Image (spheres, rainbow, N blue to C red):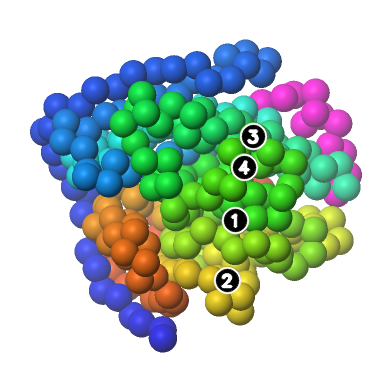
Amino acid sequence: MKKVLTLVLLALPLVAVAQQKQSYRFAERDSALWLDVWRPEVPRSDKACVVALFGGGFVEGKRDNELQTSIARLLTARGYTVVSPDYRLGLRDSVRVGQAKSLAGVTDLFQWVIDIATEDCAEAVAWVVAHAGELNINPERVVLTGCSAGAITVAQLDYCRANGLAQAAALPQGWKPAAVVPYAGAIMSKGAPRYKTPPAPTLFMHGTKDKIVAYKRFPLLLSHALRGANTLFKVFKKGGYPVWIVRFEGIGHEVASFLPGSVDLFCGFVEQVFNGRVTTLDATMHDANLKPTEWTRMTVIDLYK
């Protein structure tokens, strides 16, 4: 059923709850990769955990930036343990970027950039699962979320896991995220995306005017494309997989930063998943307080030029 939602996204104040943050090294690449663990003062009885990836177009961003800190504080105030990991930012590699002089080169570059971020996310999740006792979390209640590049990475990780691809090889055998919530995300695939095994229940949050991470699809070389929420929702629905989509009508890439203001919706979806009640929801969000900004007008070319 398709629904229309009217919801005011608020700039919610941070709840004054004592929280602990600790940093751990979880992998070595060209340099060490770290993750921050935010622990709630009063954990949920089910010991649920959220792994949240920052955005920044695979060229910038930090695990402890203002948005990540806001997300961590809001979710720990609700009893979740929150993990914010590093991942490699492939578009900082000036040599590889300089070598991408054709459409084929650009396609290969973006595939590599997404692949290495996905591999790092898999390593971070594997570390979290391996240290579940120390972190006081339930490894079967780990939710993946991210914004923009982080949203692409978590969606790509579950796609690779479900299809047995090498980028997800670090994940524990048989492990599956409890849910995935990409804010302005997509996956990279050659040809129409297919899931050999069921994906995790997923809530797609995407602006219908997003021209940075395409709402529908962004073609690269031949059948290679970044496939956004609108396309992926159709795949999930056809497969009978649990899925929600919230389409922010007339809004662009701003949705990447909407988790703090939509935390009730985020938590409501997760509770539905934990209760085994998620089926399909197709909702269009209208909010008089949401106005298009420069992020609505920007294209991926504007972002990287």
Residue 111 x/y as whole percent: 75, 44
Q: Is residue 189 above or below residue 56?
A: below
For badge 2, the amino acid type reads Phe
For badge 1, the amino acid type reads Ala
- Residue linked to disc 1: 186
Q: Secondary structure at mark 1?
A: strand
- Residue linked to disc 2: 236
CB atoms of marks 1 and 4 within 8 Å: no
| Quadrant assignment for the N terminus | bottom left
The answer to whether residue 294 is seen in the rendering is no
- Residue linked to disc 3: 170
Q: Secondary structure at mark 4?
A: loop
CB atoms of marks 2 and 3 within 8 Å: no
Q: Quadrant of residue 51?
A: top left
Q: Secondary structure at mark 3?
A: loop
Q: Which residues are magenta?
A: 92-103
- Measured in 3D between alpha carbons, the distance from the residue under mark 2 to the one under mark 3, in whole angstroms, is 25 Å
Closest to the camera, between mark 1 and mark 4, is: 4
Q: Main secondary structure of the magenta part?
A: helix
Give me the residue at 59% from left, 38% from top. 172
Closest to the camera, between mark 2 and mark 3, is: 3
